[in-house]
Image: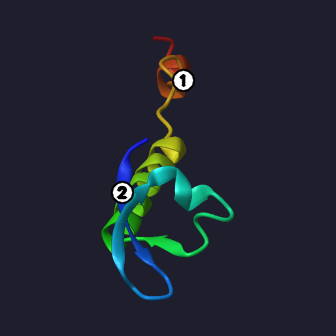
Amino acid sequence: MPLIEAYEKKSGRKALIPSDWLSHPRLGRDWSRTPRQKAGESAVTAAKADQATTKTPDAGDDRKEARNGR
């Protein structure tokens, strides 16, 4: 379980906490990720979304050549 930097919401104090705490309903409610972690996370999810929406044509999907009899 890796340690990550997080901010305590009440005091703004920065500390190293286990990464699992942020997803835990009780342990993570007083902690938030650092701005750098939030930015990195959004960049990764945006890159994954771009990869999922990019379509490449199928190899045999060239209708122009099919009409010309080639």
Amino acid identity at mark 2: Ile
All told, the count of numbered labels is 2
Extreme residue toward the bottom, this view: 11
Question: Extreme top residue here?
Answer: 70
Quadrant occupied by the C terminus: top left
- Residue at figure coordinates x 45%, y 43% from the top left: 51
Looking at the image, do the residues carrying marks 2 and 1 touch, with CB atoms under 8 Å apart? no
Closer to us: 6 or 15: 15
Secondary element at tag 1: loop
Residue in the picture at 46% in, 52% down = 19
Could you tell me which residue is drawn at 49 percent across and 27 percent down? Answer: 64
Q: Quadrant of residue 22?
A: bottom right
| Marked residue nearer the N-terminal end (2 or 1) | 2
Q: Position of residue 54 (x, y in %)?
A: 48, 43
Q: Nearer the viewer, mark 2 or mark 1?
A: 2
Vertical placement of residue 67 versus 23, above or below: above
Left-right relation of 39 to 54: left
Find residue 34 and report its image quarter: bottom left
| Dot 1 alpha-carbon crowd within 10 angstroms: few under 14, some 14 to 19, many 20 or more | few
Q: Is residue 68 above or below residue 11?
A: above
Between 24 and 56, the residue placed more toward the observer is 24
Separation (CA) of disc 2 from disc 1: 48 Å
Q: Position of residue 36 (x, y in %)?
A: 31, 68
Q: Position of residue 6 (x, y in %)?
A: 39, 68
Check disc 1 and report the residue beneath it: 61
Identify the residue at image location x=40%, y=52%: 44
Q: Is residue 4 depicted above or below 38 in this figure?
A: above
Give x and y (percent) for residue 1: 43, 41
Which residue is tagged 2? 4
Q: Amino acid at mark 1?
A: Asp
